[in-house]
Amino acid sequence: MANIKKLKLLNNIQFIYEIALARLELQSFNPDLKVTNDFREFEIKDDGNFNELKRRLAYFKTVNGEYSDYYYLQEYNQTKSVNQFLTHWIYPYKGKFHPQMIRALMNVIKIKEGETLLDPFVGSGTAVLEAQILGVTGIGIDISPLCVLISKVKTESVDVIDEIKKYKDYYLFKKNSKEPSDERVKNFYKVAEMMAHSDQSRRGRNFDSSFVNDALKMIASVEDYSNAIKKHNLKIGKTKILEDDIRKIPLKDESVDGIITSPPYSIALNYVANDAHSLKALGYDLDKIKEDFIGVRGTGLNKFELYDKDMEKAYSEMYRVLKKDKYCVVIIGNVTFQGQEINTTQNVIDYCEKIGFRTIKKMEKIIYGLYNVMQKEYILIFQK
Ligand SMILES: C[S@@+](CC[C@H](N)C(=O)[O-])C[C@H]1O[C@@H](n2cnc3c(N)ncnc32)[C@H](O)[C@@H]1O
C-alpha cells in the first residue's frame, strides 16, 4: 500500500496526555489516521502534505522514515534534560511549560506561520520561543520584570550572538573597557548574573564561578540556536515581550490568532518570593511589586477573592483580544488549601462559558513533581 504513511513517536514520550496530544496534532493536518504498534506509531493516507508534517509536528520522531525538524532541534541541548534544549533551559524558573506541548498545541489550534500567538502570563518565555521556532509571531506579557528579561534573552540573543561573544572578556574576565551599547547584549549578561544569584541562594554555589559557567553555557546554547536556524532553514517568527498587566492587555480587540497560557494556579505559588533573590538583585522593591501579582495579592481568605476577581478580568481581556472563531488554551490545576481542594479548573470553565467561550476540550494531564507527588493539571481548549 504505497499511499500509506507511517509516523513514529519520539522515544521520550511517556505520558498519556502526550500521546493524546500527538493524535490531536496529527488529526488537525490529517483527520483520517490509525494508531498502530501499541500506541508507538500512527498511519495516515498520503495526502501530499508530507513536508508540512515533517516541519511542524511536535511529538513525532519520523514521518515516513525521515526525521522531523523537531527531532533534530531537540538534539541541540546543552543540558541533561530532554525538555531543556536550545535556549529553553535558561534560568531555573519554577513551573515552565514543556516546549513540546506548546508546539503540539499550536498545531492543534491550527496557528499558521506569520499569525500571532499570545501568552499573557509568559513566565520564562517557553511559548514565545516555541512560536518563534515555528515562524509564528509571539507576544508575551508578564507583570514580572524578571520574566520579561528572561523571555527576551531566550528569544533575542540569537540576533546578536557575535556581539555577545565579543563582550565575553569584558563581562567574564573584566577585560576591555567599554560597555556594550546594545540592550540585548546587556540583558544577556544580566540573566547570566541572575542565574548565578539563583545558584548561590538555592544551591549555595560560589557566585563568581557560577556566573562564568552559566554565561559560557548560555553562549553555547545561543550558538546552537543560530546553527539550527541555518542548518534546518528555519523561518523565525517575530517576537514582542511586554512588561504589563493582563488585567488590561495593551492590545487591540480581536488582534491575535491564538492564546496559549498558564495562569498562576490560585494562590499555589508565590512568584515574588520564589524569585526574590533575582528581583532584589535587579533593584526591585518586593512589597511594591507584589501588589500587582495575581495570586500573591492580599492576605488570608481575601487572597482567594482577589484571585477570582483578577482572573475574571484576565479571561475577559483574553476574550476581547482574540479573533472570532479562534482558540484559547488554558493550562491550569486545582490546589489544595488547608486540606480542601479548590476547583479552580471548573471555575475557569464556568466563567469562560459565561463570557462567550465554547469549551472544546478538557484534557487531563498528570505530572510528577518533586518527591513523586502526583499532581493533576488540565489542558482546557476554548473557542471564541
Ligand atoms: C504559571 S506562570 C507561567 C509560566 C510559563 N508558562 C512558563 O513556561 O514559564 C504564571 C505567570 O503569571 C505572571 N503574572 C502574575 N500576575 C500577573 C499579571 N497581573 N499580569 C501578567 N502576568 C502576571 C507571573 O509573574 C508568572 O510568571
Image (cartoon, helix red, strand yellow):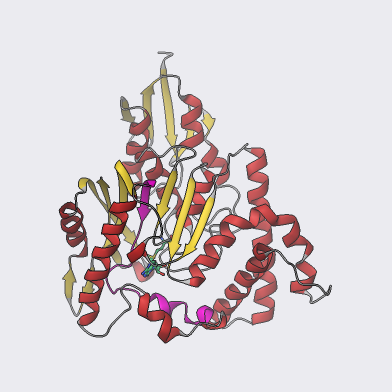
Question: Which residue is nearer to you in this view: 128 or 21?
Answer: 128
Task: Tell me which image quadrant ligand 1 sits in.
Answer: bottom left
Q: Quadrant of the N terminus?
A: top left
Q: Residue shown at 70%/63% (left/top)?
A: 182
Residue placed furthest toward the top? 1
Front residue of 52/178: it is 178
- Furthest residue to the front? 252
Q: Whole-percent x and y of residue 31?
A: 31, 27
Quarter of the image holding residue 21? top left
> Observer-nearest residue: 211 or 108?
108
**Position of residue 46 measured from the top left corner of the image (x, y, whole percent):** 41, 19
Res. 123 in view: yes
- Residue 86 x/y as whole percent: 58, 53
Instruction: Tell me if 155 is positioned left or right of 340 in this view.
Output: right
Q: Is residue 376 visible?
A: no
Apparent side of residue 151 relative to residue 269 in the rendered image (left or right):
right
Quadrant in which the C terminus is drawn: top left
What residue range appears in magenta?
Answer: 255-279
Tell me which residue sits at (31%, 55%) in the image.
318
Tell me, yes or no, whether the highlighted magenta stretch contains residue 349: no
